[in-house]
Image: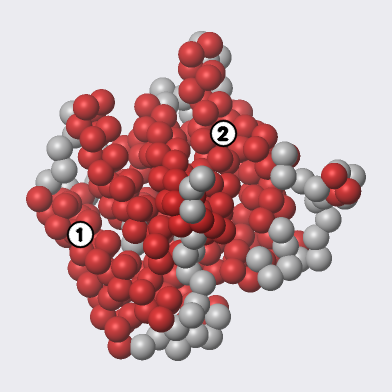
Amino acid sequence: MLSKNQLGFFYMFISVCAFSLMDVIVKWSDDYPVGQVLFFRGFCGIIPILFLIPKGRYLDFYKTTRPFLHFKRCFAGLIALVSIFIALRNLPLATVVSISFAAPIFITIFSIFLLKEKVGVYRWLAVLVGFVGIIFITETGFNSLNIYYIYPIIFCLGLSYVAIAIRKLSSTEPAWLISFFFSFSIMLLSFLSFYQGWMMPSLIDLFLLSMVGILGGLANLWLSQSYKYSEVSLVSPLKYLALVFAIIFGYFIWNEIPTSKTLLGALLVIFSSIIIFRREMYLKKNLSVPRHE
């Protein structure tokens, strides 16, 4: 039998693997309109959630007393999701993953204005180090006027508000309801892209596109399970394995080799995130950042 900490490590590891595979499929799917991929992310992402609805809630599972906060959470999440999809299709995989690690930096800033939290000198220094890392990663893109480098940053901004909103919603709403509304909103947004002309996928492509939603849904559930069984401080560092996977997949599938500045910037961003996280734990705050949740 595995201990609770070992279970926590296992769930975090398979969550990171699922997110990494989802990123690879999204990057591969650039022949299909973004809206069509979003449909599969939303529709198939609902499937794992349906198994979590309590038996007594089948008829009224969608009822909530906080619809406006759900709306704001979904709106920010959609901006983040569309941005990361566009970024994955147009930038090296390791670059996108590296910048996405900067989400805790923006959460720290947003928490000042939205949660009225006080941020000390250590976290401000961490924010500064993180921004220096982002500058290193994005310098090449901005020098060449590559607008796609802005999308991972938009993803971080959207994800930061999502984390704040989920922190508020979690006090009254079950995790499956928060996830259901988001997946359903993704599916609704995808219908707006019909004008782009959806493509009929082959059976293999249909399977891979479906896996975008299934992997995304399962990854978030496994992430929650990881935090349930183990201390957040023990398992969170495993999230940075995503960069290793991104470098490996990017090199072998798309022949992408990260630049030295990208790797240096990624290390600064990761170092900054770890400092922020450790300060959050020291101050007994619950900081968990859902990826594409």
Q: Is residue 130 above or below residue 152?
A: below
Residue lying at 57% horizontally and 41% vertically, measured from the top left: 217
**Residue lying at 25% horizontally and 26% vertically, measured from the top left:** 253
Q: Position of residue 230 (x, y in %)?
A: 49, 60
133 with respect to 157 (left or right): left
Of 18 and 256, the residue lying toward us: 18
Q: Position of residue 186 (x, y in %)?
A: 61, 42
Residue at 85% in and 44% down: 55
Question: In this image, 140 relative to 30: left or right?
Answer: left
* Label 1 packing within 10 angstroms: few (<14), some (14-19), many (20+): some
Checking the image for residue 214, the label placed there is 2
Q: Is residue 290 visible?
A: no
Horizontal placement of 226 versus 260: left or right?
Answer: right
Residue at the farthest front position: 1
Q: Which residue is mark 1?
A: 267
Residue 245, given in percent of the width and then of the height, sits at 29, 40
Kind of residue at disc 2: Ile
Q: Which of the two discs, 2 and 1, labels the residue nearer the N terminus?
A: 2
Above or below 37: residue 59: below
- Tell me if I can see residue 144 in this picture: yes
Q: Residue at x 20, y 49 (%)?
A: 141
Q: Secondary structure at mark 2?
A: helix
